[in-house]
Image (spheres, grey):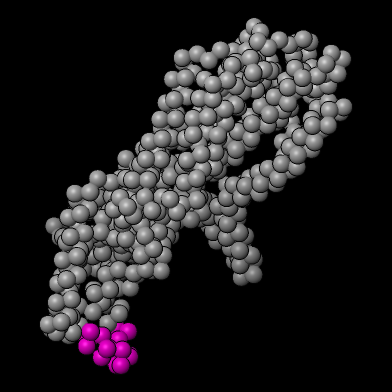
Amino acid sequence: TLLRKLDANDCFAEGCLVERWTSNPFIARTTSESELWTLKRSVFKEILKDFPKSRKVVEQAAAASKGAAPTTRRRASVRGALKAAEFVRRKTALYVHPHSHLAQMWFGVLLAAILYSTIVIPFRAAFLENHVMSWDWMLLDYTADTIFFADLIIRAFFLGFHDENNNLQVDRRAILANCLRSEQFKWHLMATVPAETAMLLVPKSRFCPLGPLQAWSCLRLNKLLRSVEVPSLIHKVETSLAHLGVRVPRNGTKVGKLLMVILLLAHLTCCVFFAMANFNQHSAVSGQRENWANDEGLLQPRPLCPGPPVPIDTVNVQYTAGLYWAMATISTAGYGDVTGNTKSSPEVIYSILILIVGLLVYSVVIAQLEGIVSQLDVTSSLHKLQTSKANVFAQIASLPDHLRVRIQDYYDLLWNSHLGVKGDRLLGYLPISLKADLIRDIVTPYLEDCFFIKDSGLDFQRYIVQSLVLEVYLPGEHLFHAGQQCDTLFFVYKGSVDLQTEAGVKFKTVALCSMFEFSAFMFEPHLCTAVTGTRCE
């Protein structure tokens, strides 16, 4: 059960530094991508040795916590009773935790409903002329409405939140007050208004030049107010997928978001642009129909309302032409084969506005793609920089050619096996516990051969594997010589190592997942010479 959530500029387990904890009284788990500064108690004790005054204050605090006065103990007991009551209340309250799997799944369903409304409603309002309102459309629309209404109820009464002190609040009144204070509440409330019920009070002929389905869709445009939540919902879906262990490529996600934004913007722009042309076709008198769709022959010369529904094949041609214009305008390509009618002021002004929006979108796309491309080639650039520095040093030091060749071979091996960076350096960026688990999983076959490791506790094994160092060797390198005092234990992760006598006669080859010279590591000097037979790690 979650008792408290910590945010930035907060700390926990301070008592570990003052008192001698034998076990942690709670479990601390990261719920999002976090950056933590840590201070070990051993390091803290060493620091206090150089600061007597601070050490005295800490000792007094430790003594006060052990032998507290009755009033202090009474205050602590009251605090403990309040925590116990809070624990019981959370156990009995019916609420949805904001970071639970149920909440994350609900956000995914909500995202699907918002995308449906954002795509389908403008399309129907612009293109499906004289089409009737079918039961299938009503079922889909009211399914989305049910999701929106349920989301409003969940947020207003059941979805817990963290207050300014980062404490989880599950009280119904507190949840409702927090929901009413939020900026999104008014948009959520406006999006749930069933404005399409006005069609029951007004005759269908009064909506001309809009057909029944078009009028229904226009009255449902308030659902598009929920589209402002799309970025935050996408982020929540990404976070939930990461918690489930689903790896989502960061660069691929960025490109996908850009494409989705561009396509949605082009879709909405296309719908508005065609709706303007269709309205001009219906309202203007014969000979004054000045719109781009009429110029392209996409509309009937004399449209009727009410009249026969426009065929789906014709709708596909109309939508394709409008989307083509929208993409060409937003991308600032402007081929000029499909353009707004220059005699129509609304179409010209609208085209200018979309060109301005296209310039902004184009700038954002360039900035995002520049970052993505630079990240794709950053590893290669760093490796070339390291290789260049090594070559410059070899020239300054006047190294012989055979050493220069070995240096180049080493960097080639490092690039082919680790893309220029050794694995242990990359693991240095991971948390200590995660790094230990990863290395332990890699070296498990070796640990099974070491009795002093496999028979020890998990804590000891973690300290051992954290001390392992990965090295990369070229063929023919000497790891040690016979008679040399042993201070290193070798595990062959990749490649092979030849064991030779003092005379240089090979008598054994140690291959993958093997350990050698274990007895020398424990008791005596090396009895043989070890030379790498192939490229080794």
Residue shown at the point (45%, 29%) measured from the top left: 144
Q: Position of residue 201 (x, y in %)?
A: 54, 21
Q: Is 320 left, or right, of 99 in this rendering?
A: right
- How many labels, in total? 0
Residue shown at the point (49%, 18%) measured from the top left: 137
Image quadrant assignment for residue 118 = top right
Residue shown at the point (77%, 9%) measured from the top left: 302
Examine the rendered structure and indicate whether residue 314 appears above or below residue 524. above
Q: Is residue 499 visible?
A: no
Residue nearer the viewer, 487 or 69: 69
Examine the rendered structure and indicate whether residue 359 appears above or below residue 450. above
Q: As drawn, which residue projects farthest toward the front? A: 201
Q: Main secondary structure of the magenta part?
A: helix
Residue nearer the viewer, 476 or 464: 464
Q: Position of residue 276 (x, y in %)?
A: 73, 26
Image quadrant assignment for residue 202 = top right
Q: Position of residue 347 (x, y in %)?
A: 79, 30
Q: Residue 56 magenta-drawn?
A: yes
Q: Is residue 168 visible?
A: yes
Q: Position of residue 277 (x, y in %)?
A: 75, 23
Residue shown at the point (55%, 61%) measured from the top left: 403
Question: In the rendered structure, which segment of residues is drawn in magenta?
Answer: 46-61
Q: As drawn, which residue projects farthest toward the bottom? A: 53
Examine the rendered structure and indicate whether residue 450 appears above or below residue 132. below
Q: Is 451 left, or right, of 473 in this rendering?
A: left
Residue nearer the viewer, 95 or 339: 95
Q: Residue 139 magenta-drawn?
A: no
Q: Is 469 left, or right, of 370 in this rendering?
A: left
Examine the rendered structure and indicate whether residue 216 appears above or below residue 449. above
